[in-house]
Amino acid sequence: MKETDQVLISVVMPVFNGIKYLKWSIESILNQSYANFEFIILDDASTDDSLSLIKSYEDKRIRLIEAEKNK
């Protein structure tokens, strides 16, 4: 099966002040053998460095959603 024939899936990961495990979590998703996915990361108004770490990735599969207020 060619990559263009693969079904696009969405992986959703919420984050709130998760810097301790965030790099490991992001790398784990990005390094999957199945590559035809969008990676939606919802930052729930983190006050640690989570947001800057997420923004440091230049992978076109990542779609960042930033909440203005923690819910």
Image (tube, helix red, strand yellow):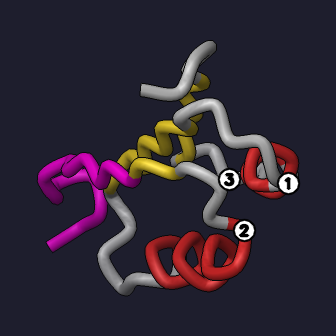
| Label 1: how many Cα within 10 Å (few below 14, some 14–19, many 20+) | few
Q: Are marks 2 and 1 in contact (CB under 8 Å)?
A: yes
Please provide percent x and percent y for residue 7: 13, 52
The quarter of the picture where the C terminus appears is top left
- Residue type (three-letter) at the residue carrying disc 1: Asp
Element marked by disc 2: helix
Q: Are marks 1 and 3 in contact (CB under 8 Å)?
A: no
- Which amino acid does the dot numbered 3 rest on? Asp
Q: Quadrant of the N terminus?
A: bottom left
| Residue placed under numbered mark 2 in the picture | 19
**Label 1, label 3: how far apart the Cα atoms are:** 19 Å
Q: Say whether disc 2 or disc 3 marks the residue closer to the N-terminus.
A: 2
**What is the C-alpha distance between the residues marked 2 and 1?**
6 Å
Answer above or below: position of 6 versus 63. Answer: below
- Residue pointed to by mark 1: 49
Image label count:
3
What's the magenta region?
Answer: 1-13
Q: Label 3 belongs to which residue?
A: 59
Residue 13, given in percent of the width and then of the height, sits at 39, 54
Hey, what amino acid is under mark 2? Answer: Ile
Nearer to the camera, 54 or 67: 67
Q: Is residue 71 above or below residue 46?
A: above
Q: Of 13 and 9, which appears nearest the observer?
A: 13
Q: Choose the circle earlier in sequence order: 2 or 1.
A: 2
In the image, residue 9 lies in the stretch drawn in magenta: yes
Q: Residue at x 33, y 54 (%)?
A: 37
Label 2 to label 3: alpha-carbon separation: 19 Å
Q: Residues within 10 Å of mark 3 (few under 14, many from 20)?
A: few
